[in-house]
Amino acid sequence: MHGHTISMRLVPSTTSAMGIYSLRQLHLSRAKLKASSRTSALLSGFAMVAMVEVQFIDSCREGPEGKTETDECPVPQWLLVAFSLCTTLLVAVHLLALMISTCVLPHVEAVANITHVDSMASLRGTTATVSESPHITMHKYIEAAWTFSTVLGILLFLVEIGLLSWIKFLGYSKNAAIGSTVLLVPIVLLFTLFTFHFYWKLVAQKVEDADKTLQELEEQLRV
Amino acid sequence: MHGHTISMRLVPSTTSAMGIYSLRQLHLSRAKLKASSRTSALLSGFAMVAMVEVQFIDSCREGPEGKTETDECPVPQWLLVAFSLCTTLLVAVHLLALMISTCVLPHVEAVANITHVDSMASLRGTTATVSESPHITMHKYIEAAWTFSTVLGILLFLVEIGLLSWIKFLGYSKNAAIGSTVLLVPIVLLFTLFTFHFYWKLVAQKVEDADKTLQELEEQLRV
Amino acid sequence: MHGHTISMRLVPSTTSAMGIYSLRQLHLSRAKLKASSRTSALLSGFAMVAMVEVQFIDSCREGPEGKTETDECPVPQWLLVAFSLCTTLLVAVHLLALMISTCVLPHVEAVANITHVDSMASLRGTTATVSESPHITMHKYIEAAWTFSTVLGILLFLVEIGLLSWIKFLGYSKNAAIGSTVLLVPIVLLFTLFTFHFYWKLVAQKVEDADKTLQELEEQLRV
Amino acid sequence: MHGHTISMRLVPSTTSAMGIYSLRQLHLSRAKLKASSRTSALLSGFAMVAMVEVQFIDSCREGPEGKTETDECPVPQWLLVAFSLCTTLLVAVHLLALMISTCVLPHVEAVANITHVDSMASLRGTTATVSESPHITMHKYIEAAWTFSTVLGILLFLVEIGLLSWIKFLGYSKNAAIGSTVLLVPIVLLFTLFTFHFYWKLVAQKVEDADKTLQELEEQLRV
Amino acid sequence: MHGHTISMRLVPSTTSAMGIYSLRQLHLSRAKLKASSRTSALLSGFAMVAMVEVQFIDSCREGPEGKTETDECPVPQWLLVAFSLCTTLLVAVHLLALMISTCVLPHVEAVANITHVDSMASLRGTTATVSESPHITMHKYIEAAWTFSTVLGILLFLVEIGLLSWIKFLGYSKNAAIGSTVLLVPIVLLFTLFTFHFYWKLVAQKVEDADKTLQELEEQLRV
Amino acid sequence: MHGHTISMRLVPSTTSAMGIYSLRQLHLSRAKLKASSRTSALLSGFAMVAMVEVQFIDSCREGPEGKTETDECPVPQWLLVAFSLCTTLLVAVHLLALMISTCVLPHVEAVANITHVDSMASLRGTTATVSESPHITMHKYIEAAWTFSTVLGILLFLVEIGLLSWIKFLGYSKNAAIGSTVLLVPIVLLFTLFTFHFYWKLVAQKVEDADKTLQELEEQLRV
């Protein structure tokens, strides 16, 4: 009895290939939620400041008859509409990501903190805790927060930078605004390319991981 | 005597299903309070900056006879009243959440820190500490801070963004303000939907958790 | 001799009900000081920014004869006096809380860090360290910092928001300023109510805690 | 031989009263340096922002003949001189505190980090490391950083708030500036009182601590 | 059997030269990603604020005929174009670095956190986990984020500072703008030199490390 | 064999005087890099904000003939040149320090994290890891980052404050600018004095440390 207890402690349940894989998913979810909450707070913060602090040119103010004197205001109507839509969408996307990670993260952290204490405990206890963990049942939300915060959020942010440089420079130098937009096109392409390449690599690795886990399980069953 | 002491240490009280559940609630409360205090500080900070820094159009100033010249000022009275009410409510809701988490968090953290030391101690000691813990007696306050900070606070924040874009864009482009509002309607619906879905999932999981804990306790009693 | 040393390590001094209670108070003091220093830094920071950045209306400038032309300036004298007093008091209260926690926290942290090392040591050492700890001798200061930072500081902050919305909106819409004030009255009442309810609950729990500790000590003495 | 090694580990050198006292001083120095560096960064940051952002009234600009038209500018010369001196002194005091803690803290942290590893080692090693530690040889600098950051720095900051409210409000409402100053006088007194009381309590506790350490050493020598 | 288990724990798999080298690479990747995400957030934050807050001189506004009155506006067109391009590139480079580290860091952290638990486990488990780690398969991305954030990002930032001082000072003092540029030339050279020297040193050390690892492996095989 | 393994764990390699000294240097380097990166981020951040936000007086704008009307602009040309040079140098020095610590810190942290795991391993492994550590091969860079960030960076910052108060106050009160400069002269002297004293003390302690290490090594060799 005594020797059995000691060996349980030295070879904890997490050594089994299945346990490590499950624990790794838990830590991955936690790190993803933390990273997306940090990125969202940063980028939504700037979008808000840009909205409050940006100064429109006085000559663009609408007259009482609802029309601007077009010969004086260099900023066209559609630019203001696009800026307004982009800022609202940007803030909303990041707030949604922030809300999801604020909702889900405490549940994931509670399980991750328990696992530390638990890893010294018996085999059955551990697997039970991890399997009923929110990082599996709330998997869809975690991926949504992640996608909103990194992929959609950063792409929208690049568009916002482009629109902002039009609003900022249009009155002073049209070439500056055009140059900024020309530069942004390949950058947005690079972002999209990276996103797809990264996603493809991730799926490839997940398949490989599952293969390895299966092989290890087979080997363990043989031994 | 000697062997008994060692086994107590290797199989601490937290391995019992009841203990783990209680500990998990403790960590959940702590993570919730931390997350709501961080979110509240961020969002109330922006609401304050927006209130101090936003510039109203000069032509909207009230004359000595208490009336604005309506043909010059594009911002109607009710918009300013709504903005004032929304900002005050937003700041107050986040301050209330901040106050509650500042009050309750130290009590929860003190117990959580003790549990680490305590987990090496005897069975009776641990359960005593956790059961007299503030995360149960102050449960209502923790949920209130959580709801104020995430659900009510973020919804109010979206409304604030909508009002801000009206105040900011009304003098320049009515379409920009309308576009922003039209975009916000489905987003607010999405937020509400997510909130209810998340809440429903949480209740469902809680029921399932309680079932599992009961089953495990039954199995433990049989063995 | 050998067995005695091991049992001392496995059942450290902190398992005694008295030791845990004392340790819990130590961690509570530390968490309180940390929370009040964080809250004070945040709120005093905003109060300062509000003071430096707020723009008074030009027409309110005092003429050389020391009187303002009352038909042009909508902000009355008493409002500026109230704003000045409230900002000064708000900053001072938070600076006082910041100063106390900056002074007392290092002493509490030094003891808390020692306790970790100490908890593996002999029984006599631990209790000696904790009892001569600053969290007991400086108890009054910790409570003062706490009260200044949370109760007084947040109430003053709500008043500041009210005054700020008067200064900001008075020139544009009297109704907005009135609406904000009307909204603040029930909120301030809610804050006061929560404070008293929380305080009452805390005192009740302290009495209960003391009762339990006494009972446990009695049981320990019997065994 | 075997038993001797184990007992050394279970009863480390830090259990001796002298070792704990020395280690506590080390942690106290570290916490003090950290707290003073945080406070200094916060307060000097605000002083800088206040200096860059504050707007002087245009009518106070000096004419080419080096004299201001006194009937238009409400801010007297001595107020600007006092504000300039106070801001410079405030920033310098906090920068000095920041510099000292940036210089000394790494040396103290290196020793504190070593102590963790070291505490499992032999008796002789530990005491050697701690006694040659920078927290003793650089004791004067640590106290200087502490005093600069908390006592002098916060008092200067209160004076800065007073001066700022004079510069800000003088053109609009003399009573607001006077009210703020009248409020600051008892607050500065309260700060000074607290500082002296806290210092006196600290010295008293140090004497008591030294007495206790001596008594414990005597008791240990007897046993 | 019992003795075998204990020796496995005391001499974990990481003691083998290969394991330590692999683990060190893992921690290096994590630290690099963390550092580049922090630097990118800081520098992109400033670039954004500089873009939103910088004020162009009113006299430089383009007239309705698309031409500025050149005798009044001291800022030439190409300067605005260069500033616009540099800001866009700077923000995009840092956002790209931020996105890569937000994407890759969670995967690296999940493995690093597992390694702690795992290091108490069997030899085979550890090497399996580390070898299938993302810090090797995503090595190219980590180096890209690193290069974007530190090398390219800081060089672009120096150029931005130079352009900003031209835009800021050109209307007031041409010499100030020229002086700033003259000062920046040797600084940019120093940066480039440091980058190449550091890179060369790193490659040299990597070669040396590989040599040492080989030698140690040979020695281990002999023993 | 069994007893040998245990004694290796209980008396790790770091207990030897040489190992502790080496480990202490490692932690010192890490703490220095962290501190200098934090200080540099703070101070360069302010220097940037000061550059973007400072408002020059309109009357100082250069006319089309490249000359300012000297009877209206109180700020002389050399002051603007000095401010431009000082800001550029200040930002560059802190960016250089930031870049060095961003480059070197990950390498030092990777080794420091490994050491924790490694300290339970065999003697030979540890010394090998620490001796091939970047904190020795990159020693020159660490000291450079340190000096740039603390000594040069803070002295330049004090000069910047002096120049800023001239630019800010010159139009309003010459005495305020003179007073600020007069105050800065003894403060800069105090800084230089402290730097030299601290450096001298450090060298003295290093010599003493080396002596002690030699003595301990001699004693160990005798035993």
Image (cartoon, coloured by chain):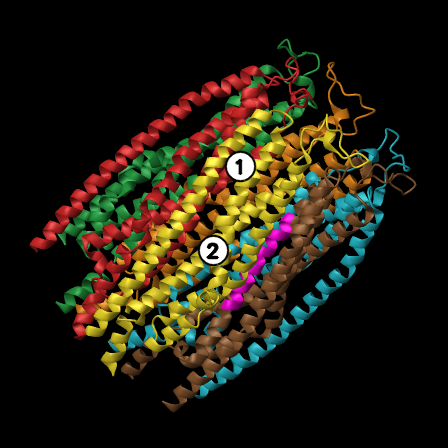
Chain colours: A cyan, B orange, C green, D red, E brown, F yellow
Q: Say left or right for E105 vs C36.
A: right
**Residue bearing mark 2:** F34
User: Outermost residue toward the right?
Assistant: E65
Mark 2: amino acid: Lys
Q: Which residue is at the front of the view, D193 or B171? A: D193
Question: Label 2 is found on which chain of the structure?
Answer: F
- Expressed as whole percent of the image width and height from the top left, the position of residue A108 reads 49, 59
* Amino acid beneath label 1: Phe
Q: Residue D139 colored magenta? A: no
Q: Relative to residue F172, is residue F65 depicted above or below?
A: below
Name the chain under label 1.
D
Q: Residue furthest left?
A: D222
Camera-nearest residue between E14 and D188: D188
- Report which quarter residue B139 is drawn in: top left
The count of marks equals 2
Q: In the image, residue F22 lies at what x, y percent?
A: 36, 66
Tell whether A121 sits left or right of D64.
left
Figure quadrant of the N terminus of chain F = bottom left
Q: Looking at the picture, does residue B153 appear above or below residue B211? A: above
Percent across and percent down for residue A129 are 44, 65
Vertical arrangement, residue F157 with respect to residue C64, above or below: below
Of F76 and C89, nearer the camera is F76
The stretch of residues the image draws in magenta is: E28-46
Q: Position of residue F12 (x, y in %)?
A: 29, 71
Q: Which residue is mark 1?
A: D46
Q: Secondary structure at mark 1?
A: helix
